[in-house]
Image (tube, rainbow, N blue to C red):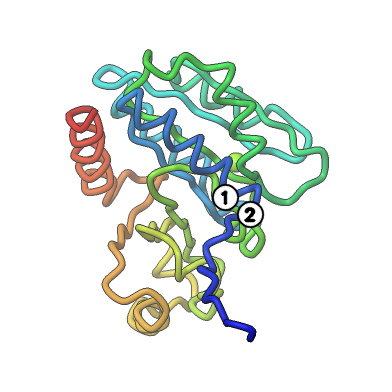
Amino acid sequence: MTERVPIVENILSANDRLAQENRACIDEAGVFSINLMASPGAGKTSLIEQTLSRLKDKLRIAVVDGDIATSIDADRASAAGARASNQVNTGGECHLDAVMLHGALAQLNLRQFDLLIVENVGNLICPAEFRLGTHTSILIASVPEGDDKPYPGMYRGVGALVINKIDLLPYVPFKMDYFQRGVEALNPGVLTFPLSCRTGEGLEAWIHWLLGNVKRAACLF
Ligand code: MG
């Protein structure tokens, strides 16, 4: 007689297993880590620069920069005060994955840092599919991209949403209410930081949130 045995559908992909390893290393070091995702030009590097300019004297910050080919963003992070700035060239891949972050972490002594910022490749679809092992993913939307772009895969999994370039609201047809209703449908109650990296408006709330998380991560381990 054949007996049916329920199989727990918990077989992790190779990427997810390595993401768990990455997370264990990050947790052991007491570091808070974020994965910044956005379309090209939304302001990932600008947000990193503004974050560094406000926190570089309080926190030891490492940046891992994913880019298809150049080191421009990693150079900007170094110039802005990152204690370490590690470039990962993806060789054409449109996202980072856990293997790439694993390689980057191997070159960092994580215990020397308080905050790890991972800048994913500029792409609004693929990065959501690949867990890296960071504590949370942050999506940056920007006002000139329009108010009708809440791509489901990206918005559903993120821990917070930054709406950048709010200084452009008077000049472009972006209805904040309409946009936020779309976001709410995909990720109810998601923490949202409307801000402008150019004028500095709204950055205080973002910095406050980051600092709170860094303190919590440092206490837990
Ligand atoms: Mg960039």
Residue type for callout 1:
Asp
Task: Residue 206 in the image: state x and y as whole percent.
Answer: 27, 47
Which residue is nearer to you in this view: 165 or 33?
33
Secondary structure type for disc 1 = helix
Q: In this view, does 191 lie above or below 46?
A: below
User: Residue 81, located in which quarter of the rendered image?
Assistant: top left
Q: Which mark is residue 149?
A: none
* Residue positioned most to the front: 1
- The picture quadrant for ligand 1 comes to top right
Residue 180 lies left or right of residue 18; in this view the side is: left
Q: Residues within 10 Å of mark 2 (few under 14, many from 20)?
A: few
What residue would you read off at disc 1?
16
Q: Position of residue 50 (x, y in %)?
A: 39, 35
Q: Is mark 2 within 8 Å of ligand 1?
A: no
Ligand 1 within 8 Å of disc 1? The answer is no
Q: Residue at x 42, y 82 (%)?
A: 182
**Residue 4, above or below 58:** below
In this picture, residue 199 sits left or right of residue 25: left
Q: Which residue is drawn at 68% across and 49% down?
A: 95
Identify the residue at horizontal 35%, vertical 32% (top origin). Answer: 27
Look at 57% across and 50% down and name the residue there.
Answer: 16
> Disc 2 on helix, strand or loop?
loop
Measure the C-alpha gap from mark 1 to mark 2. Answer: 5 Å
Marks 1,2: beta carbons within 8 A: yes
Q: Which of 153 and 144 is in front in this view?
A: 153
Question: Which quarter of the rendering shows the N terminus?
Answer: bottom right
Q: In this view, does 69 lie to the left or right of 156?
A: right
Residue under pointer 2: 13
* Residue 145 falls in image quadrant: bottom right
